[in-house]
Amino acid sequence: MSWVFKQSLWALLGSIALMLLAHAQDQSGFISIDCGLEQSPGYTERITGIYYISDSSLTDTGDSKSISLDYRDQFTRPFWFLRSFPRGTRNCYSISLTGGAKYLIRASFVYGNYDSQKGNLPEFELHLGATLWDSVAFSNASSITIKELLHTPAQNHIHICLVNIGTGVPFISAIELRPLPTASYPTQMPKQSLALLLRYDVGQTANTAGYR
Ligand SMILES: *[C@@H]1O[C@H](CO)[C@@H](O)[C@H](O)[C@H]1NC(C)=O
């Protein structure tokens, strides 16, 4: 290799490294919660570089559970643990954020036979505060169910609630909040939320980087 070529190669590698570094650190305002995670403080997910925290300080109910080992390899780490809510009809998370800012809120669910009842998949409701956000159901034990919403909270916190409707124990795998520029999605007004009906990336399996 010529000296010039080596120099350019190093310069190129250097700028790639810088880009990766900038990317890895650009998580300001991100809130990424691994529901059911017992470890504190948290961990950096290997593929996305996203830092996940435990949900233990955000809800005072529910039980930490893990999906069956048979399913683990198919999913990234945030899906290994979940929190299930066998007691009470309505169980909520209280999450602090910046009131008046626009957020993408994403709730994810992987059943993974965590309670060994895979013949009887649960169905339940997801609420944002007092408002029904969506129903949560599963195709099978290894399917991922993702619910996303664009929302501008009026206050400095939101409540995300799981509601038992008599068809199985509610649970949740992960909650992710991403602040968005205020000018994005102008159809979304402060007093209403916009549910995402279609999305380009439903992945977040072990093979794809998924959404950041
Ligand atoms: C589970 O459901 C998903 C989504 O409908 C489907 O893509 C997948 O093939 C199913 N897996 C099994 C093991 O049936």
Image (cartoon, helix red, strand yellow):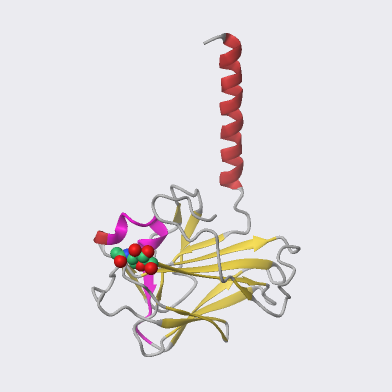
Is the residue 34 above or below the residue 152 in the image?
A: above
Give the residues in magenta. 71-87
- Looking at the picture, how far across and down is residue 31, in whole percent? 56, 62
Question: In the rendered view, does 5 fall on the left or right side of 62?
Answer: right
Q: Quadrant of ligand 1?
A: bottom left
Residue 182 against residue 118 in the figure, above or below: above
Return the residue nearer the eye: 5 or 80.
Answer: 5
- Between residues 144 and 78, which one lies in front from this camera angle? 144
User: Is residue 102 positioned above or below 88 on the image?
Assistant: above
Residue at 58 percent across and 70 percent down: it is 196
Residue 168 located within the stretch drawn in magenta: no
- Along the line of sight, which residue is nearer the eye, 187 or 106? 187
Which residue is found at the position 60% from the left and 16% from the top?
7
How many marks on residues? 0
Residue 203, quarter of picture: bottom left
Which of the 4 image quarters holds residue 22?
Answer: top right
Left or right, residue 103 beside residue 91: right
Let me know if residue 38 appears in the view.
Answer: no
Q: Residue at x 65, y 76 (%)?
A: 193
Q: Quadrant of residue 145?
A: bottom left
- Residue 177 in percent (x, y) is at 57, 64
Q: Is residue 19 visible?
A: yes
Instruction: Please tell me which residue is depicted at 56% across the width and 78% down the height of the picture.
Output: 159
Is residue 78 located in the magenta-colored stretch of the structure? yes
Q: Quadrant of the C terminus?
A: bottom right
- 116 sits left or right of 50 in the view: left
- x, y (%) of residue 176? 53, 64
Residue 18 picture location, percent across and down = 60, 35
